């Protein structure tokens, strides 16, 4: 099928639409290049910005009111995607809490649902041809609807820089909010309840320190409160359910952790990551609530999980993190790992006390009345009244040393 025939075959497309620079240009471009009807889908994932301008922009370019979807997905996002990921203590390449990656499978899911509802034969996204998001969106879409057509404008058009996008927007009367422009292109940003990310501008030089004015959610540790703050998180089956005695919905709890962590300078990250498409990329991230949650979850697991189960989870975590980072949320292997992880969380119940201060999250207490495996009568440094026979260690040590003793006798130690 020729390029012209392929474009003619598309009658209606659902666009993942933020209302920002890239997707506003894409909306107009789809209408001109494909001559198709465009349905817009804007996801409220807790990015903290007014979403109604996306509706007005879509209407401006002829999208029918009934074909504009603005969906509040905050609860589903945290409950069904963020929390399951944190049950695994998921960190990519030792630092990144996957704030962008974990949102993509939900957006892909909703894109496919709207396409079926609206009778669309294609979906489109604004991910660049250099990024990971194109892989995440499209793997998710194909997993959920193997016959769907996908339009990736960045792999088709010649608008391959932010300056060209801005020029296109100006020519076609597309209103663009220029936050953080300051004489150049705006940062490429992504935000949801778990994080906010920044790429582009002088961040493309990995030696350059981020501008302090760039950060939105957090103060610098130097400017953080001088008074430490204590908080207590309660967990049920591995998920946080209450903060300082108040039961909250998952998205409410994460939003509150973001607020608390932000004012204490917690959760900033400056990272050069290895992208799935083969290049290294520098980005900066703010994940205050996620940083607190990760610390607390590991603390409650420390007293509730069996040692070998905890170690096995730690061995599986890098593979699980890579699956999410690389777009395989809907894959059978991720689902299998998730079942194992969730099974390990049935007895992860209790509370963790934390201290927030100047960019740091410190665990200062944890307990589980029903599921703690910590036995003070055995762990004590005082008289244990025979609860633990220290002499048992002799045979254990000698057996484990046997192979090394044999090798040493052969001069191979």
Image (cartoon, rainbow, N blue to C red):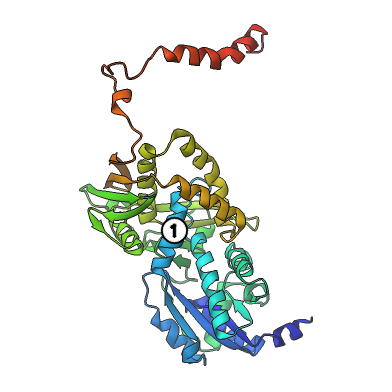
Q: Is 57 placed left or right of 48 in the picture?
A: right
Residue 167 in view: no
Residue located beneath label 1 in the image = 82
Q: Position of residue 267 (x, y in %)?
A: 38, 53
* Extreme-left residue of the structure: 227
Q: Position of residue 82 (x, y in %)?
A: 44, 58
Relative placement, left or right, of 356 versus 331 is left
Residue, x 46% and y 11% (percent of image)? 394
The x and y percentages for residue 228 are: 22, 47
State which quarter of the image contains the C terminus: top right
Q: Nearer the viewer, residue 391 or 212?
A: 391
User: Residue 268 or 384: which is nearer the viewer?
Assistant: 384
Outermost residue, top side:
409
Q: Residue at x 55, y 89 (%)?
A: 172
Residue 310 seen = yes
Please tell me whether mark 1 sits on a helix, a strand or a loop.
helix
> Can you say whether 22 is above or below 399 in the image?
below
């Amino acid at each position: 099928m020729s390029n012209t025939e392929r474009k003619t075959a598309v009658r209606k497309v659902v666009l993942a639409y933020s209302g920002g620079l890239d997707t506003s240009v894409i909306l107009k471009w789809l209408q001109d290049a494909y001559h198709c009807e465009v349905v817009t889908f804007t996801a409220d994932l807790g990015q903290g910005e007014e979403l109604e301008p996306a509706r007005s922009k879509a209407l401006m370019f002829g999208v029918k009111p009934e074909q504009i979807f603005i969906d509040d997905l905050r609860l589903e996002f945290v409950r069904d995607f963020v929390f399951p990921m944190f049950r695994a203590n998921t960190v990519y390449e030792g630092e990144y809490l996957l704030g962008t990656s974990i949102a993509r499978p939900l957006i892909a899911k909703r894109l496919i649902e709207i396409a079926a509802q609206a009778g669309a034969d294609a979906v489109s996204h604004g991910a660049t041809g250099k990024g990971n998001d194109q892989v995440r969106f499209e793997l998710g879409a194909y997993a959920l609807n193997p016959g769907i057509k996908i339009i990736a404008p960045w792999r088709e058009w010649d608008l391959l820089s932010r300056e060209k996008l801005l020029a296109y927007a100006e020519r076609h009367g597309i209103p663009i909010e220029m936050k953080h422009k300051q004489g150049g292109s705006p940062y490429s940003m992504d935000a949801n309840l778990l994080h906010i990310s920044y790429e582009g501008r002088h961040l493309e030089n990995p030696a350059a320190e981020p501008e302090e004015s760039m950060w939105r959610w957090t103060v610098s540790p130097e400017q953080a409160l001088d008074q430490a703050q204590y908080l207590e998180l309660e967990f049920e089956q591995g998920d946080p359910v209450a903060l300082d005695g108040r039961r909250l919905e998952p998205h409410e709890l994460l939003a509150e952790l973001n607020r608390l962590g932000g004012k204490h300078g917690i959760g900033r990250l400056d990272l050069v990551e290895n992208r799935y498409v083969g290049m290294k990329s520098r980005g900066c991230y703010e994940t205050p609530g996620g940083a607190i949650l990760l610390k607390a979850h590991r603390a409650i697991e420390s007293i509730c999980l069996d040692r070998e189960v905890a170690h096995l989870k730690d061995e599986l975590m890098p593979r699980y993190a890579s699956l999410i980072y690389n777009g395989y949320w809907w894959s059978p292997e991720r689902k299998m790992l998730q079942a194992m992880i969730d099974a390990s969380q049935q007895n992860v119940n209790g509370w963790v006390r934390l201290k927030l201060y100047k960019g740091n999250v410190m665990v200062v207490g944890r307990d589980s009345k029903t599921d703690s495996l910590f036995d003070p009568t055995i762990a004590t440094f005082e008289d244990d009244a025979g609860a633990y026979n220290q002499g048992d260690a002799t045979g254990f040590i000698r057996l484990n040393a046997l192979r090394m003793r044999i090798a040493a006798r052969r001069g191979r130690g």
